[in-house]
Amino acid sequence: MSTWSPRSWRGLPIRQQPEYEDPLAVGAVLQQVSALPPLVHAGEVLALRSQLAEAGLGRRFVLQGGDCAERFQDLNAEAIESKLKILLQMSVVLTWGAQTPVVRVARMAGQFAKPRSRATEQVDGQDVLTYRGDHINGHAPDQRRADPQRMLRAYFHSSTTLNYARALLDGGFADLHAPEHWNLDFVRQPERREQYTQMLARLREAVGFMEAVGGRQETLRSVDLYTSHEGLLLPYEEALTRRVGSRWFNLGAHMLWIGDRTRALGGAHLEYFRGIANPIGVKVGPTMQPDELIALLELLDPEDEPGRVTLITRYGAGRVSELLPGHIAAVRSTGRSVTWSCDPMHGNTHSTPGGLKTRDFEAIRAELRGAFDAHRQAGSVLGGVHFELTGEDVTECIGGPQGLSAEDLSRSYETFCDPRLNYAQSLEVAFLIARRLQADRGRS
Ligand code: PEP
Ligand code: CO
């Protein structure tokens, strides 16, 4: 195999990239980004990698989540606080269900570039370039030209977000098991509310006990939070790739994943990803062939290193039972260790008659159930979950504890890309997963 360098992807077939009008301006921006300090430390990246390896064995559980696409306009304290709050609260619930520490990986501080199914779209009867995320162009129809300066802005937005997130966690914001931080008002059914209240009470007792014996760090008060984004815009990712010792790391995030649309064998994205030492995610959708999956693992993880690859499956509720067993069997036939995660969002998107993209809470729930079932039947471990979610009370996905209907969506539809679970839907899904994890433990 030819030698790898941070730029060896250049010249290979590449998908989902913007066309910049001024290559010199792009070069100048990339030079600036590559001179800026890393956003994360290689030691943290390696810590995450070993935690993901443990999740692959069922000794931890991964919660990865956040916006589909972060927006520059949301860079403010409240938005960062509410994202952290929902992730931490969900992780507390999952810790209780899994009885293992939860690894929190935010889609945050860099999730600004999106793959799109079409190059252009119609806005008010006009053909305009599609919005590819704030990393590349603006959402307003007159801002759709790809602007290289946005790569520099994305770097500074990421660093500011990460700085405030770290400050919150260091400052004790992680005390979210305290009763005043929880809002269960959304749970309308009295028995369900009673059940959750009891769960939280037991959780608090457990926390109190662990604090009393001084062993709390690892399970509930640990302030570890890792960042992740789709490694889509390769010129930018290359500029954040740094040599540490004998290895290369992408130090713009702890974990990066390859999207379902850019994982082609022989393509630029796989070439870039094979050379970085970060833990990497691979989205696995319905078109992935089992032999292709094996080839991909051999390329990305030739040494079969635990924690290196997390396979994030996203088939859709109707197809998970048909497709996941074959992928589990393919990986098993190689004797390799991977960490499995379920993304019940990206295979379950549809549009309402009014033209809004949405997802049905029941479909999300069904794909999760299908993934848990398939792994259980195969004697394999589902080590984590991957969501698009927000701590705000938005109306983007239908169903869930508030019973949102298609007509409700226009009330608070904020996302520029995919629909996210809101606070109530996110907490509900965490309780459902916790109950399933608990039930599976009881069965084994
Ligand atoms: C995403 O996670 O935002 C995404 C685009 O997912 P996928 O590559 O699985 O479609
Ligand atoms: Co998305």
Image (cartoon, rainbow, N blue to C red):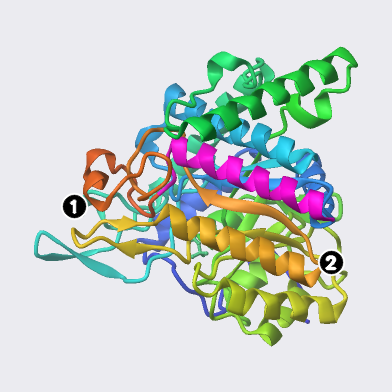
Say which quarter of the image contains residue 267.
bottom right
Which secondary structure class fits the magenta region best?
helix
Residue positioned 32% across, 50% down in the render: 416
Looking at the rendered structure, the secondary structure element under dot 2 is: loop
* Residue mark closest to the camera, 1 vs 2: 2
Q: Residues in magenta?
A: 420-444
Q: Is residue 429 magenta?
A: yes
Pick whichever of labels 1 and 2 is earlier in the sequence: 1
**75 vs 280: above or below:** above
Q: Assign a secondary structure to mark 1.
A: helix
Q: CA distance from mark 1 to mark 2?
A: 48 Å
Say which residue label 1 marks: 142
Residue 29 screen position, x and y as percent: 47, 49
Question: Closest to the observer: 129 or 183?
Answer: 183
Residue 240 visible in rendering = yes
Name the residue located 84 percent from the left edge and 50 percent from the top edge: 54
Q: Quadrant of residue 260?
A: bottom right
Residue 272 point in image, percent of width and height: 65, 67
**Crowding near the residue tagged with mark 1, few <14, some 14–19, many ≥20 C-alpha atoms within 10 Å:** few
- Establish if 275 lies above or below 255: below
